[in-house]
Image (cartoon, grey):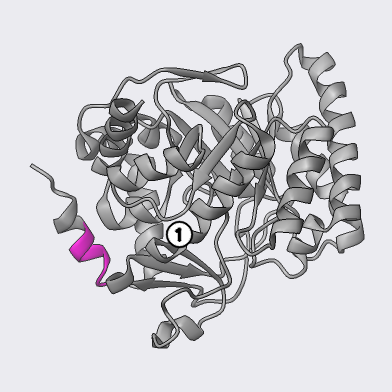
């Protein structure tokens, strides 16, 4: 029996961020509930970037910013779990309200702004979490760090998370930190990749393990920008790309009152654009370069379509809110059968 619709009905009566906080608190205190809600996990092993995933479905960054529910999400059957975005210092994020549901469109708008407890708190939780899933940690910069000093925030986080992460994601694509997406511009992007690459090699020697390093990109770029990022990532030894973050566009929502809210849009309206970016990236980088597809997965059919668009691995977030933990196994089965 699927109990999630009952839980969702109660949660959707609350403010979106308040219900999110209550859910995180519950999963943190009762990690076994993740498995009870999700049902039986799906085994569809795949090896990518030197890591062994039990299936191709992952949790996208942003839902568990502080690594409070790693064990609960592990019990939901995810093949990998990405926590964060985390910054060097704790920060409150943007003023509330800053998260909005669009139930008719199966979408969310958020302008949270990397609200998190800081990298030290996340690392401590990640170090003691019991899990079978691969763990990714998504890193960013503090809002009050000038753009010209952003690399130091990323480097600080990289050093801290390196011992406990299975892979690390550089988030330069959130629309909710002022100026952050400017780091996707050619010169700044190249400089950041050089610094991160040098630091990663030093850390690999120190820890005896080379952690995969990925970059998460925005869907709001033209073809030239997209291909330039893909080219730079490959040249500088980045191990993969995550496509995509939320969008500042409002596809199909132009007449909706909520569309006027600032922030990143996720969920079903993002799907077409995210899949198009993914397909364009795949045609550019070739068959063997790792790509993780995220954006608009609300069913097994959506997962299968994103896999066909070029994704090696998939991530969900908004779909989990609307469909519940059963979506994990549904998507994992769909792509396992399709493969």
- Quarter of the figure with the N terminus: top left
Percent x, y of residue 72: 36, 36
Decide if residue 67 is on the left or right side of residue 288. left
* In-front residue for pair 38/182: 182
Decide if residue 44 is on the left or right side of residue 284. left
Q: Is residue 305 visible?
A: yes
Residue 112 higher or lower than 80, as above or below: below
The range drawn in magenta is: 8-14
Q: Residues within 10 Å of mark 1 (few under 14, many from 20)?
A: some
Decide if residue 207 is on the left or right side of residue 53. right
Q: Residue furthest front?
A: 283
Residue 254 higher or lower than 225, as above or below: below
Percent x, y of residue 100: 42, 73
Instruction: Tell me the element at label 1.
Output: helix
- The image quadrant of residue 125 is top right
- Circle 1 sits on which residue? 272
Residue 185 higher or lower than 14, as above or below: above
Residue visible at 84% across and 37% down in the picture: 196
- Quarter of the figure with the C terminus: top left
Residue 151 among magenta residues? no
Q: Is residue 165 visible?
A: no
Residue 126 higher or lower than 309, as above or below: above
Residue visible at 54% across and 49% down in the picture: 65
Percent x, y of residue 148: 92, 59
Percent x, y of residue 44: 35, 20
How many marks are shown on the rendered structure?
A: 1
- The image quadrant of residue 32 is top left
Decide if residue 132 is on the left or right side of residue 121. left
Residue visible at 51% across and 60% down in the picture: 273
Residue visible at 62% across and 22% down in the picture: 49
């Amino acid at each position: 029996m699927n109990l999630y619709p009952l839980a969702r009905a109660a949660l959707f009566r609350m403010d979106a961020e308040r219900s999110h906080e209550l859910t995180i608190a519950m999963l943190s205190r009762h990690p076994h509930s993740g498995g009870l809600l999700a049902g039986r996990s799906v085994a569809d092993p795949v090896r990518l970037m030197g890591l062994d995933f039990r299936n191709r479905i992952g949790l996208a960054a942003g839902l568990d910013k502080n690594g409070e529910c790693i064990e609960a999400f592990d019990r939901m059957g995810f093949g990998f779990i990405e926590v964060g975005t985390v910054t060097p210092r704790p920060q409150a994020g943007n003023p509330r309200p800053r998260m909005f549901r669009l139930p008719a469109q199966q979408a969310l708008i958020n302008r949270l702004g990397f609200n998190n407890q800081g990298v030290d708190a996340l690392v401590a939780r990640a170090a003691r979490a019991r899990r079978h899933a691969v763990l990714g940690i998504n890193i960013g910069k503090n809002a009050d760090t000038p753009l010209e000093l952003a690399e130091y925030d990323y480097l600080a986080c990289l050093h801290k998370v390196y011992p406990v992460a299975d892979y690390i994601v550089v988030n330069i694509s959130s629309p909710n930190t002022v100026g952050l997406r400017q780091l996707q511009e050619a010169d700044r992007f190249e400089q950041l990749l050089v610094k991160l690459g040098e630091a990663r090699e030093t850390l690999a020697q120190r820890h005896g393990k080379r952690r995969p390093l990925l970059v998460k990109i925005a869907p709001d770029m033209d073809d030239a920008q997209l291909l330039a990022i893909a080219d730079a990532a490959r040249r500088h030894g980045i191990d993969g790309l995550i496509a995509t973050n939320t969008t500042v566009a409002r596809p199909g929502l132009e007449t909706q009152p909520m569309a006027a809210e600032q922030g990143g849009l996720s969920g079903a309206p993002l799907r077409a654009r995210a899949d198009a970016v993914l397909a364009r990236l795949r045609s550019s980088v070739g068959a063997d370069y790792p790509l993780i597809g995220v954006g608009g997965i609300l069913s097994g059919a959506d997962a299968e379509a994103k896999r066909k668009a070029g994704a090696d691995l998939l991530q969900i977030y908004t779909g989990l809110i609307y469909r519940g933990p059963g979506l994990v196994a549904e998507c994992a089965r769909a792509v396992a059968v399709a493969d």
